[in-house]
Amino acid sequence: MKVNDIDIKGGVGELLIENISFNKLDLSSGVGSVDIYTNERTGEIDIKGGVGDVNISLGDINGNLKFEGGMGSANIKIPSDAPVNIKTESGLGNSNIRAKTSGENKYIFDITMGIGELNITN
């Protein structure tokens, strides 16, 4: 499925986005879990997390990702040939970046965590 823009304001609960191609995703989550799994083309992604876990698996990256996490864990999986530069900042918790990238810094993944664990893998 292909859509231009997705704008989601979450409250309490679970959110699942699967196999959608988009130009822009704006997501503000409240309390609960967020799961985004897609091998389709993705554009700009802006996520403001509240309390809970966020799991993201991307297959075809064509935009920047800005993630501001509150409290919980974030697991982000990207292809090993992703043309991204990963920048992280965290308050209380661990940042585990084990992902390989193409070395081409075409897009920026700017990830800030408050309290919790961040894992970035391939």
Image: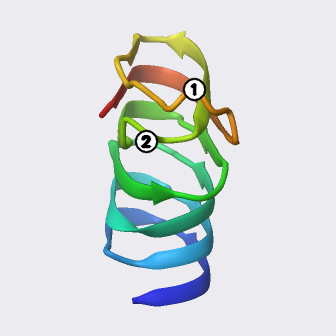
The amino acid marked with disc number 2 is: Val
Residue 55 badge: none
Residue 51 badge: 2
**Between residues 30 and 76, which one lies in front from this camera angle?**
76
Which type of secondary structure does the marked residue at label 1 adopt? loop
Q: Which residue carries the number 1 mark?
A: 103
Dividing the picture into quarters, in which one does residue 14 lie?
A: bottom left
**Does residue 69 show up?**
yes
- Classify the position of the N terminus by image quarter: bottom left
Which type of secondary structure does the marked residue at label 2 adopt? loop
**Between residues 13 and 113, which one lies in front from this camera angle?**
113
Which label lies toward us, 2 or 1?
1
**Does residue 111 show up?**
no
The residue depicted at 70 percent of the width and 42 percent of the height is 106
The amino acid marked with disc number 1 is: Gly
Say left or right for 54 vs 27: left
**Between residues 118 and 87, which one lies in front from this camera angle?**
87
CB atoms of marks 2 and 1 within 8 Å: no
Marks 2/1: CA–CA distance: 32 Å
Q: Position of residue 74 (x, y in %)?
A: 38, 35
From the viewer's perspective, is residue 40 above or below residue 113? below
Q: Residues within 10 Å of mark 2 (few under 14, many from 20)?
A: some
Q: Position of residue 85 (x, y in %)?
A: 63, 29
